[in-house]
Image (spheres, grey):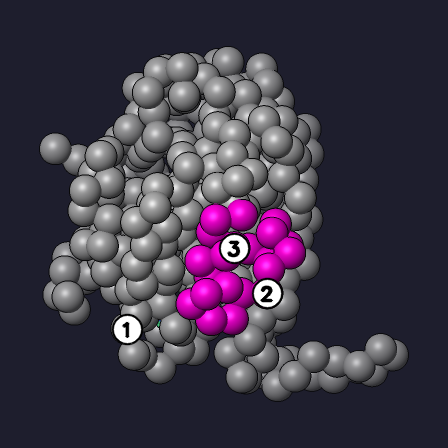
């Protein structure tokens, strides 16, 4: 049976500005191209879960504008349930992605409607939260409503997954109700103070995250792969070797795919991590966030 995944999170329209390098202060320079694509960490993770086979619902906010309509259409096309996507008096979120020829990106965010999610929205979405197998969130929407959603989820035996991105300090009440946290190396360092650059520092950061209250940890390591510590069991799954052209949403695709595959007792954690790595290795080979997210069939074809 398909996993039921509910994502509480952000919806952004991404404007991708393709540049040879970042401009210096005061410098004017040409772009080589520009593109527009659906994105936002929440939307990317929900679409990855849905395309990989999960029964997926979304809790979020859009503005009364064309960008909001575009985001709803994209989620609907991938089969995501939008009952709890409501309208705000702020504009739909946007991201401006400076994508350099090297593949590196720098992102500016307009939070807009994403920042207007309240505890009341969480109460209205009680059914979507309590009937899920997994509740997933990130840090592009307010964190106190997220903590409330996690608390409701835990009361009903739902597994909570926190993607602590973009990197910021997290409230204790959120950490304590997190079953799985999925930082990248930078986020793990911000949360623990441990510079994550080898296996022993991955172990040390994961142990510190557990001491902060989270139960299980996955640290994503970009093109190197991912490290996990579930309880006291640890392991490493290498990334697939591919030529990356745009890593935007690599982490989101990884997490969405993982939530579609992971069993509630975590007994298939390594298999789920290989599946997630395969999904994100496909995503990094294509430009844009939502356009790059693969389906389950595409992932299975490369495994
Ligand atoms: P982003 O913020 O760019 O969405 P992230 O920093 O949250 O990503 P990463 O650790 O960069 O997350 O990547 C997540 C996973 O995606 C990695 O664990 C790996 O499996 C896969 N991945 C990322 N970059 C590459 C790459 N260049 N080649 C192959 N796989 C990759
Ligand atoms: O994680 C990638 C996403 O971060 C982009 O789609 C952009 O919208 C930003 O939120």
Q: Is mark 3 within 8 Å of ligand 1?
A: no
Snapshot quadrant of residue 155: top left
Residue 63 vs residue 236, the one in the foreground: 236
What's the magenta bit mostly, secondary-structure-wise?
Answer: helix
Residue 250 vs residue 162, the one in the foreground: 162
Residue at mark 1? 240
For numbered disc 2, what is the local secondary structure? Answer: loop
Residue at mark 3? 205
Disc number placed over residue 195 in the picture, else none = 2
- The mark nearer the N terminus, 3 or 2, is 2
Task: Name the residue at 35% across, 30% down.
Answer: 159
Disc number placed over residue 298 in the picture, else none = none
Task: Name the residue at 36% across, 67% down.
Answer: 225
Considering every residue shown, the one lying at the far right of the view is 26
Q: Is residue 271 above or below residue 19?
A: above
How far from the left and from the top, in percent, is residue 60? Answer: 51, 32
Q: Is mark 1 within 8 Å of ligand 1?
A: yes
How far from the left and from the top, in percent, is residue 33? Answer: 56, 78
What's drawn in magenta, residue-wise? Answer: 188-208
Q: Residues within 10 Å of mark 2 (few under 14, many from 20)?
A: some
Give the quadrant of the N terminus.
top left
Q: Spatial distance from mark 2 to mark 1, Cα to Cα?
A: 24 Å
């Amino acid at each position: 049976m398909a996993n039921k995944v509910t994502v509480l999170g952000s919806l952004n329209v991404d404007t991708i500005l393709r540049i040879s390098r970042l401009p210096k202060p005061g410098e004017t320079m040409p772009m080589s191209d520009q593109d527009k694509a659906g994105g936002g960490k929440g939307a990317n993770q929900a679409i990855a879960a849905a395309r990989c086979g999960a029964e997926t619902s979304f809790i979020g906010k859009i503005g009364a504008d064309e960008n909001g309509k575009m985001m709803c259409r994209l989620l609907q096309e991938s089969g995501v349930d939008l009952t709890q996507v409501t309208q705000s008096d702020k504009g739909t979120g946007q991201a401006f992605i400076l994508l350099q020829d090297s593949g590196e990106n720098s992102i500016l965010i307009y939070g807009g409607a994403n920042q207007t999610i309240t505890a009341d929205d969480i109460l209205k979405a009680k059914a979507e939260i309590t009937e899920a197998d997994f509740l997933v969130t990130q840090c592009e929407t307010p964190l106190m409503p997220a903590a409330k959603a996690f608390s409701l989820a835990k009361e009903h035996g739902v597994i909570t997954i926190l993607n602590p991105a973009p990197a910021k300090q997290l409230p204790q009440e959120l950490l304590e109700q997190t079953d799985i946290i999925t930082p990248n190396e930078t986020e793990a360092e911000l949360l623990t103070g441990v510079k994550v650059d080898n296996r022993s520092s991955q172990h040390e950061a994961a142990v510190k995250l557990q001491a902060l209250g989270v139960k299980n940890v996955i640290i994503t390591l970009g093109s190197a792969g991912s490290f996990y510590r579930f309880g006291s069991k640890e392991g490493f799954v290498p990334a697939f070797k591919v030529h990356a052209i745009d890593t935007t949403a690599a982490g989101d695709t990884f997490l969405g795919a993982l939530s579609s595959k992971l069993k509630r007792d975590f007994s298939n954690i390594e298999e789920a991590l290989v599946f997630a790595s395969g999904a994100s290795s496909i995503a990094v080979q294509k430009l844009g966030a939502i356009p790059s997210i693969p389906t389950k069939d595409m992932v299975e074809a490369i495994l």
